[in-house]
Image (cartoon, helix red, strand yellow):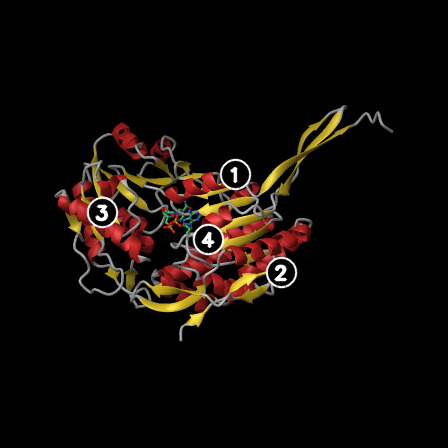
Amino acid sequence: MVTQYKNLINGEMVENGEWLDVVNPANEQVIGQVPACGAEELDRAVAAARAAFKTWKNTSHEERAAACMAISAAIKDNSDELFRLLTAEQGKPHAQAQGEIFGAAGISKAQSTLKLEDVINEDSDQRLSRTRRVPVGVVGGIVPWNFPLMMAIQKIVPALMSGCTIVLKPSPFTPLTTLRVAELIADKVPAGTVNIITGEDALGPMITSHPGIDKITFTGSTETGKKIMEGASADLKRITLELGGNDASIVMPDADPKKVAEQLFWSSFQNAGQVCIAAKRVYIHEDIYDELSQAIAEYARNVKVGDGSEQGTGVGPIQNKKQYERVLELIEDAKDNGYKFLTGGDKDPSGTGYYVPITILDNPPEDARIVAEEQFGPVMPLMKFSTEEEVIERANNSEYGLAGAVWTADTNKGVEIAEKLETGTVWVNEFMHLSPFAPFGGHKQSGFGAEYGLDGMKEFTYPQVITIKKDNVVA
Ligand code: NAD
């Protein structure tokens, strides 16, 4: 009998007698079941969130912060159980699962300090004008399967801190850790403020079009993001969309291959490449291309691909079968076109589990599918470039604009290039670092709006301007 994980609605853990299986991608075994919810459960969750909003919107910053700190503590205090569960459902190696669990606890704590202060627009002899931020109401949160708990938390916490209540839907592939956290926090946050319900993809559009929901905050693919924007237009719901990316890393000729090889490797292969902000196109200056590409391939040969719960695994399986098949298709396409591989290129022979060998391509053309499309798997195309102008143009030649990185001994040059990249985030000499206080959002088709920091929190609020005429002609 597999463990059944219940949903959180109005402060209670509930189920409806219908279940969805959740599979461990490392061995394809069913490891848990979650409720298969539809319109009826969604209506109940939205009603609970609406009722809770009436009081939650009037709470003080301190009350909201206390709830978010309780969430942080619940995650941290149970980190051992949670990271093992996360590896089992998502596939990422234990150390990376620990990173996500502690990251979720840390973000909850850090963001519980965020406060949107009133802004004085005018304080003249005639009038006092002040902008305050008021919560939008009930938020619908929809999250993907690559960082299931982190993505859930980065929606729940700013919603609560801004005075909103939330109905959150995890990905059907990875709902277990989130539902376990739901159970842990059920009696720590006021009933109805946080509701978590599970269902197939079809539950997503029901959330998007539900009249009792005022805002959608979504992380997932660009394709689904477009559908959400369309669905939300019926009643002009507010939306925040964190979507796909095809991030470029640029390695300048003054970078030391021995020093950057390992970091570049992990910028692409963290979480088996299933990271929106992974380096998915790596441009290396021709002067150091041969040495650096060999150094990366050499490093890769010593990284173990396997079950994330096994000691020493660096790269786990792909999270689900659909994505596994998509990544294999891109690799097949590269083989059919005769592109050269430094590592990988063959299907994993073991047969069970969604494993893809670490795949590094040697200078494929810019229009190769494996370069132009978001791979979202353990794949790293290395490309040669000659001039700064050329590489900036190639990096920007994408419908995406999520993040990017520049690697150089000359930090000023790094910043100069960073400012020319058309992305929401650019790192100079590091990768994937996100601050809970800095806005994170995509340019172009990588997103709409931002998460994190005060900019992210503002998206859960409306501005309300109160203007007082000082010369009171009514009295
Ligand atoms: P996805 O778009 O398939 O699914 C994401 C969520 O949307 C799931 O919960 C799914 O059930 C739900 N959903 C599916 N169809 C829906 C619809 N029509 N309406 C409403 N909801 C619907 O994405 P995924 O495959 O789970 O995740 C991978 C993608 O997410 C990649 O493109 C990746 O780059 C992106 N991503 C972006 C960020 C970011 O912050 N920008 C972070 C992580 C992942």
Q: CA distance from mark 1 to mark 2?
A: 29 Å
Residue toward you, 130 or 99: 130
Q: Is mark 4 within 8 Å of ligand 1?
A: yes
Q: Earlier in the sequence, mark 1 or mark 4?
A: 4
What is the secondary structure assignment of the residue under circle 3? helix
Q: CA distance from mark 1 to mark 4?
A: 17 Å
What is the secondary structure assignment of the residue under circle 2? loop
In this view, the mark in front (4 or 2): 4
On the rendered structure, is 455 left or right of 463? left
Which residue is located at x 63 percent, y 53 percent? 64
In the picture as drawn, the residue positioned furthest to the bottom comes out as 1
Q: Earlier in the sequence, mark 4 or mark 2?
A: 2
Q: Residues within 10 Å of mark 3 (few under 14, many from 20)?
A: many
Which residue is located at x 57 percent, y 41 percent? 458
Q: Point out residue 457 in the picture as x, y percentages from the top left corner.
A: 55, 44
Q: Earlier in the sequence, mark 1 or mark 2?
A: 2
- The residue to which callout 4 is attached is 203
- The residue to which callout 1 is attached is 234
Q: Could you tell me if residue 304 is visible in this image?
A: yes
User: Against 65, is 75 above or below?
Assistant: below
Q: CA distance from mark 3 to mark 2?
A: 46 Å
Residue toward you, 404 or 39: 39
In this view, the mark in front (1 or 2): 1
- The residue to which callout 3 is attached is 330
Q: Point out residue 93 in the picture as x, y percentages from the top left corner.
A: 34, 62
Q: Earlier in the sequence, mark 3 or mark 4?
A: 4
Which residue is located at x 58 percent, y 65 percent? 12
Residue type at mark 3 is Leu
Q: CA distance from mark 3 to mark 1?
A: 36 Å
- Residue 191 is labelled as 2
Residue type at mark 1 is Ala
Residue type at mark 4 is Leu
